[in-house]
Structure formats: C-alpha cells, structure tokens
Amino acid sequence: MKTMLHARLVLGVFLARPEAANPSLNDRVAELERLVLKQQELLSSQEEQFQETQHMLSDISRAAAEPRRLAATTLPPKVHVIDNTTERAFTDIENLQQALDHTWFILCGAMVMFMQAGFAMVESGCCRAKNVQNILLKNLTDVCVGTLGWWMSGWAFAYGGPMVDGYLENGFIGTDQFFGAGFMSTPKAGMIEPTGAIKSWFFQWAFCGAAATIVSGGVAERVNFPGYCIFSFVMTAFIYPVCVAWTWGYGFLAKDISDVGYMDFAGSGVVHMTGGVGALVGAIIAGPRMGRFDNPDAFNPHSLPLIVLGTFILWFGWYGFNCGSTLGMTTAAKGMMAAQVAMNTTIAGATGGLTVFTLRLALLKKYDIGGFCNGILAGLVSITAPCGNVEVGPAFVIALIGGFLYQGASALLRKVKVDDPIDAFAVHGVCGAWGTLAAALFDWGDGFDLYHGWSGFACAQDASGVCLKGAWGGGMAANVVEVLAIASWVAAWSTIIFLPLRLANFLRASDSVQQEGFDAAKHSPSKAYAMGEPGAGSCVISA
C-alpha cells in the first residue's frame, strides 16, 4: 500500500510540470500506473497465500499434538453415529463415493438383469414355434426361482464369509448371511444402519441368474418344467455360489494356488463356463429331441428376427456385465479401467461375429445369420475374463480364436449327436474356458515375467512395492486350476441332479408331448403366436 501511495504522489508532481502536457508522456505515465497496480495485486495475492500456508501449518501442528483426532479417521463410517470412540460419520468425499458406487452397481446390475430378455429372445428364436411359450416359461422361472435361491443361501455360500485377513476362512464355502442376515442392524430404537452388502447382493444376483439361464437353452424342447425348476434352484442356491466362493469370494483360488491368484475379471469361467458345462451335462442326460438327427431341417430356428434382437440385447447388457465388474466408479483409475473394458468388449464381439460368419460362408457358401449371432456371443464370452488385463490387440486375437473354437465345438457336438439347441456349451462352455486361460496367457505384463492380473494398470507387487518376477507362471497355473475345478464341480453336481430325475422319468418329456409341442400340450393359450387366426388382424401392403 505504501508503494502505491508513493507512486501516485510522484505521478501527481510529475503531471503538474508543464512538459507533462505532452500526450505521449501522458500515455507512458498511464502505462506506468497500470504496471504499479498489477504489482500491487500480485503482492496482495502472495500475502494471502502466505497466510493460508500459515493456517495449514497451524492445523497440522494441532493435529500432531492431538493424535486421537487423526486416529478417528480410521474408525468405520456409519450413517448413524452412536459412539464417537468406535465409529464416525461419513465425510463429504465418502458420501459422494458411496453414492457413485451404489449408482454404478445398480445401473450395471440392471443392465445384466436385462440380459435375461436377450437370452429369452435368442432361445425362443432358435427353437420351434410350437415350444416358444415353454421356453419363455423357463426363462421367467430362472429369474424368479434363482432370486429366491440366491437370497436363501446363494449369497451366503458365495460371499457370506467369515473372512480372515481378507480371505475366506475355510477357502471353500461361506457360512454366514443366509436370507440376507446382517445386511442391516438396529443400533438404537428408531435407527436402521445399512451396509454395503446390499448393493453387492443385487449386482451379483444378476450374474447368478445368467449362469442358470444358460442351462435352459441347452436342454430346450424336451425337458419337463418341474424337473428343470429343481435344477434351476440348486444351481442358483448352491452349485454356482460355491464356484463364486472359490474365486470372487476370496477362496482357495484367490489365495492358495500362487502369489497372484487366478484372474477372471467378469466371469468367463465363473459364470459362463459354469452355465455351459451344466448345459452340456443336461443335454447328454436328457438325450436329443425326438427326431433331431433323423430330420435335421425340421429343427431349424423358427425366428431369426428374435435371435438377432436377443443378440443385440445381450451385447448391450454385456457392458454392464464387464464394465460393472470394476466394482466401483470413484477414482480416475476405475473410470479408465471401465473404458478399457468397454473397448475390449466391443472389439471382441465384432471380431467373434465376423470370424464365425466368414467360416460359415466358406463352409456353406451361404450367409448364416444364426452363426453370425453366436459368433458375436462367442467373442463376448471369450473376452469376459481378460477384459480388464489385456490391451485391445490381444482382445482381437482372443475373440478370433474364440470364434474358431466355437465353430469347432459346435460341429463336434453335432457329429457325436449331442443335441444342444442353442449351442450353449460351444458358446459359453468352450469359449468360457478359453477366455479364462486367455486372461493369463495375454496378460499385459512385460513378456512372460511380470504379471498384472487384478492389479489393473500396475504390475503385481511384493510387500516392498517391487514388481514380482516370474509371476506369470503362477497366474497361468491358477487359471488352469480354475478351469479344471469349476468344470469338475459343475459336471459332478449337474449329473447328481439330472441323472436321478431322468431315471425317475421326471426329466424328459414323453414323445407324444414333444410331437404335439409343449405349448399345445401344457399351456393356455395353446399357441405363442396368433398370426393367421380369426381376429388376429392382418397387414396388407399395396404397391
């Protein structure tokens, strides 16, 4: 301030002199005054910054003198704070993070749930018109029965714990939180304290339903509804949850196989291979549809439009499936990982579809839209495990190989006369196993030495923060064990359920029902479509 007053006094005296009347001198003086004003503003800003720094240092000093205040931030945050010594309120940034995470889980979980509509369209389109209602009934039942199975015991077996040092205590199966117990508490009358398990329950429920629905396509058009309901419940309440406990539930595959554990980002093995193996076992035990290999042309898909619509719905839902597996959206790194996952998923779907379309064109000399759709799904299944630890180039290669594997598996099943109406095993079982292995094989670590896996954009590190050397071998071994363990578990339990049902004549529909069609024999109304019926309406197109 003193500098400014002095400058103005000098300027006043100077301007009072006669020669100051010169216009050019006036301009120079004005410019000088502007420079002085600018200098004053700079000094004032620096003084404010200095004062803010002093306040920050003062706060730090007080915090250092009061260690209990710093320790309070390590207490668990609660919606309702009853005891300040054992709990604390959420900070502003934690409130925002929780809101973002919950929104992300609900949005992505809803997208995965909408995949059920895609499965319903694909499965019903692939089968004959006389069984459409029965196919849709099984899809609806998978969601509803699967929901109750997941609520009763599925979540508890998969994620219920107890946990020790961040891993499942027994390494095999959870034993707590049946029927959602412990999701909320009542610390005081009139106060309900929720937990983050609720959002996870919803998101993981959608995955559970997907695994069960895959099986319904593999046993379509010849399995009785009550027998299928039994399998659907056991799959969602026990078989699938145990596979989750070993992996995403921090069981033995995450802890005991190697230093870096397995890598299955969104479930090529955990979800898709589980459903695919169950479908294969069910298809073998139920046997082929009556006349399937005597008159193959009679079993062609009845609606390609439904298949294409279902494929697009599934592809859309896959972004919730894969991107949602970041399990949060509160940091820049998670946002960038979700974007990387989305790009990999997109490239893989397109590559898989074009691969199978080209192969079928070469084999049949005609365009095969159904094969195109299954190729897209094969590419998507193949990238589901490695979508979070590979670059886009390897994603292209993974889907390309997945397309070839799908085509080979589909042809092999027909050759050995295993009737899988929608190629559930070829798409989900074979490509699911391949995707799981590819997650380790193409990991974006440096060569075959460093390994990233679950560490995302950083290498897997030891306790001192140094990249683990030779970690790739451990990651590959863990994923091989994952494929073998899940395939064996699902095949064994699927056999235990399906085989007694078949021997008791409770699984396979009679030849008369298959001949008439499930819709006419078991449903009311007796047809899924009213086209051509009186009063059904008509469409006239004139030139």
Image: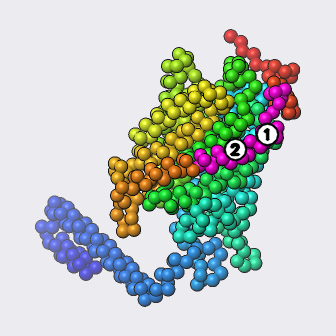
Q: Are discs 2 and 1 less than 8 Å apart at CB?
A: no
Instruction: From the image, tell me which residue sits under label 2.
Output: 495
Near-viewer residue (177 or 98) = 177
Query: Residue visible at 44% across and 60% down?
Result: 259
Residue for point 79% across, 39% down: 503
Name which residue type carries label 1: Leu
N-term-proximal mark, 2 vs 1: 2
427 within the magenta span: no
Secondary structure found at label 1: helix
Q: Quadrant of residue 154?
A: bottom right
Residue kind at label 2, given as amino acid type:
Thr
Residue at image mark 1: 503
Residue 401 lies left or right of residue 210; in this view the side is left
**435 relative to 463 in the view: left or right:** right
- Magenta range is 486-514
Residue 232 location (% of width, % of height)? 73, 46
Instruction: Identify the residue at the far front of this view.
Output: 503
Give the crowd class for mark 1: few <14, some 14-19, many >=20 residues within 10 Å: few
Quadrant of image for the N terminus = bottom left
Q: CA distance from mark 2 to mark 1?
A: 12 Å
